[in-house]
């Protein structure tokens, strides 16, 4: 991703995460371009990326709306995603990884290892890590060898935070982001090792734990105030 596009994505995500653009609010590439002082192209690409992670949804016609969802809904979505990802990892461990999957794992792990080795993180590192993270997760789900797992996942993939590898990152808290990435890389290494050794039980167990870490990560860095981390919960908390 080009630096300008990356900056717009990070800044727009931050505005949503901090509640500056609230749940239910309508936004468009024109509005985002004016708000951030950029052209419409990076604004359009940023909105498309945020749609893929469930933070915004496309409106009929033109524009987007910031998603509104209950905390209980997010927990259920992540639980379902974790079950499917864990099952996929276990299935791949049992039946073996293809050469294409092995190359994808190797590439993803090299990228995340290089970022973690820096002992600090920049906004660019967070975005680069997310690309590698998504590659790791999609490789397991799409190449596990069981197409029915992917068919089941397709039913939920466009729900908030259900996209493979999706997290609500905070680029204003880079120390916390570096810790998250370090833990994530270590878990990826364990999952990869289990798959390569054919240890289905360990691959599934660690993959489920890793997949379900999104809300745990939020609580780790913002305490009990989960609303501060995922704003789509702010205006739709459980009643």
Image (spheres, helix red, strand yellow):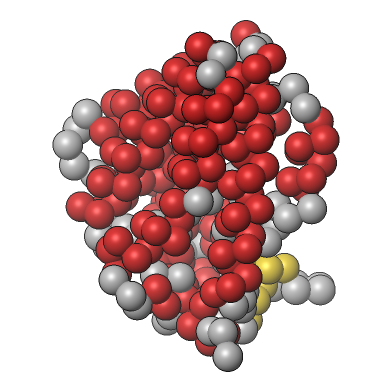
In which quarter of the view is residue 65 placed?
Answer: bottom right
Is the residue 56 above or below the residue 157 in the image?
below
Q: Quadrant of residue 183?
A: top left
Comparing 59 with 167, the one in front is 167
**Image quadrant occupied by the C terminus:** bottom right
Is residue 54 in sight in this rendering? no
Residue occupying image coordinates x 81% and y 30%: 147
Give the residue drawn at x 43%, y 30%: 188
Residue depicted at 63% across the width and 63% down the height:
76
Residue that appears at 31% across and 26% down: 113
Q: Is residue 227 above or below residue 76?
A: below
User: Quick check: 102 above or below 168?
Assistant: above
Residue 116 percent location from the top left of the image: 26, 33
Between 135 and 84, the one nearer to me in the picture: 84
Horizontal relation, residue 1 to residue 124: left or right = right
Left or right, 222 with respect to 89, comes to left
Q: Can see residue 199?
A: yes
Q: Residue furthest bottom?
A: 239
The image quadrant of residue 140 is top right
Instruction: Decide which of 116, 127 is in the foreground and name it.
Output: 116
Question: Which residue is at the far left?
Answer: 119
Question: Residue 53 at x, y = what percent?
Answer: 59, 56
Counting from the top left corner in percent of width and height, residue 12 is at: 45, 66
Give the mark count.
0
Q: Residue furthest front?
A: 201
Asked if residue 14 is positioned above or below residue 42 in the image, the reply reads below
Residue 152 coordinates in the image, percent (x, y)? 79, 45
């Amino acid at each position: 991703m080009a630096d300008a596009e990356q900056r717009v994505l990070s800044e727009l995500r931050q505005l949503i995460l901090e509640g500056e653009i609230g749940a239910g609010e309508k936004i468009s590439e024109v509005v985002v371009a004016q708000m951030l002082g950029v052209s419409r192209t990076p604004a359009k690409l940023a909105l498309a990326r945020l749609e893929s992670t469930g933070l915004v949804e496309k409106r009929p016609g033109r524009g987007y709306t910031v998603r509104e969802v209950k905390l209980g809904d997010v927990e259920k979505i992540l639980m379902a995603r974790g079950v499917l990802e864990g099952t996929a990892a276990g299935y791949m461990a049992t039946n073996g990884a293809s050469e294409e999957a092995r190359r994808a794992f190797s590439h993803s792990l090299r990228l995340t290892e290089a970022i973690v080795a820096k002992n600090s993180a920049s906004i660019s590192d967070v975005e680069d890590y997310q690309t590698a993270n998504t590659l790791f997760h999609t490789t397991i789900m799409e190449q596990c060898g069981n197409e029915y797992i992917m068919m089941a996942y397709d039913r939920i993939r466009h729900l908030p935070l259900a996209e493979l590898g999706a997290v609500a990152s905070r680029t204003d808290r880079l120390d916390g982001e570096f810790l998250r990435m370090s833990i994530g890389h270590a878990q990826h290494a364990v999952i990869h090792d289990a798959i390569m050794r054919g240890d289905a039980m360990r691959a599934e167990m660690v993959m489920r734990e890793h997949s379900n870490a999104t809300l745990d990560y939020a609580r780790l860095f913002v305490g009990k105030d989960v609303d501060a981390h995922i704003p789509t919960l702010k205006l739709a908390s459980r009643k």
